[in-house]
Image: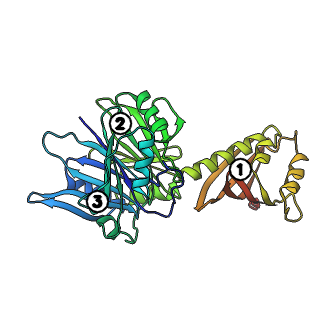
Amino acid sequence: MRRTIVLLIAASSLAAEGPLDLDGIAHVAFRVSDVAASREFYGKLGFEQVFEFSDANGTTTSYLKVNDRQFIELYRRTAAEPIGLMHLCFDVQDIERLREAYAGHGLEAKAPAKARAGNLLFNLRDPEDQVLEYTQYLPGSLHWKARGTPPKHVSGHLVAATVAVKDPAAERAFYAARLGFEDLGGADTIRLRVPGRSREEVQLEAAAPEWKPRVVVAVPDLGRTVAALKERGLAVETRGSKAQIADPDGVTIVFTLEPAALEILELERHALEGWLGGDPDPSLALLDADATYFHAMTTHRLDSAAAVRALFEGYRGTALFDAFEIQNPRVQMAGDAGVLTYVLVRHNGAAVSRWNATQVYRHNPDGWRVLHTHFSQIPQPAK
């Protein structure tokens, strides 16, 4: 079986910078047993059809909108065709520039041509002879005309998709060395970050008879998402910081926080773990040069990283708590900033205190840094 991996190249607000940079995942396409049934299922998630192609027997391809640059495509199968993943799509803004960059890496690609949806495309092949197809959205195309539809979905961002491959090592090397993807590690599931600023991923897994595709979508609040899915009559399985459902053909849809939000949460957890042993270094490493700080232990706002550093150094060697919990975390992303709010539960022997926490993270060339901190203790309920 030959699977087509479509790298869909679209104009978007995330400008590609390097010659191999893409703007992110543009769509995932599935061959389905029943287009109408799958379309109804995804409609419950708010991914509504914005256009289709059809013939005398009905819909051949249904295009469901995730956001202005991302889609899910449902293809009608024939009796001889397998159900499941057909192709992935990624977007970039300049198809000719990308083709020339690939040529410089020894990859052959023909000149772009216009497809029936009104966009340009070219093809190349991976080590397993799978077709990779690259497309640039053009004004007036069907995808372009679908922009601006008000969203009704539980998630508006497709952040990762899995592909089954025969030789994971060879495909891993191809994506990293030839296509410029960042290898994030992994054994059973190889994580490869799309080059560019999207932080979206392709995940490679060894092909197996029972393998099922998986897509990952981001949500701002997992608890609310799970409740919304259940209200829509969907069977939801929760696993830690993730939840998942299955479509009519067994494709798994995983709901989680944004990749950047997960990074911020992990950094926050690591910094708090340092204080278990009185080590301020993980927190100090996160300080932005322009950091400000509010806390119950201070009488006023600290207005510099140096002032915050001096405060932290005063507690070096002092464990601030024996254990802690991060409850009800939420990260709200806005460009290169992320606002993390949560309830910090501190355990000191038999004593337990609860704190409202706000951390404003800013992304700079060195990674995520804390620009502002505000901790306030929650009063104990009256006995």
**Mark 1 or mark 2, whichever is nearer to me:** 2
Determine the secondary structure under disc 3.
strand
* Dot 1 amino acid type: Val
Which residue is more in the foreground, 32 or 177?
A: 177
Marks 3/1: CA–CA distance: 46 Å
Q: Residue at x 53, y 58 (%)?
A: 221
Asked if the residue at tag 2 contacts the one at tag 1, i.e. Cβ–Cβ closer than 8 Å, the answer is no
Q: Dividing the image into 4 quarters, which one contains the N terminus?
A: top left
Q: Which circle marks residue 126 in the picture?
A: 2
Determine the secondary structure under disc 1.
strand
* Residue 174 seen in the current view: yes
State how the image is colored: rainbow
Which of the two discs, 3 and 1, labels the residue nearer the N terminus? 3
Which of the two discs, 1 and 2, labels the residue nearer the N terminus? 2
Which of the two discs, 3 and 2, labels the residue nearer the N terminus? 3
x and y percentages locating residue 87 in the rendered image:
31, 45
Instruction: Return the residue at label 1.
Output: 345
Q: Residue at x 32, y 64 (%)?
A: 143
Q: Residues within 10 Å of mark 2 (few under 14, many from 20)?
A: some
Instruction: Return the residue at label 3.
Output: 63
**Mark 3 or mark 2, whichever is nearer to me:** 2
Q: Which circle marks residue 334 in the picture?
A: none
Left or right of residue 10, residue 33 in this image: left
Determine the secondary structure under disc 2.
loop
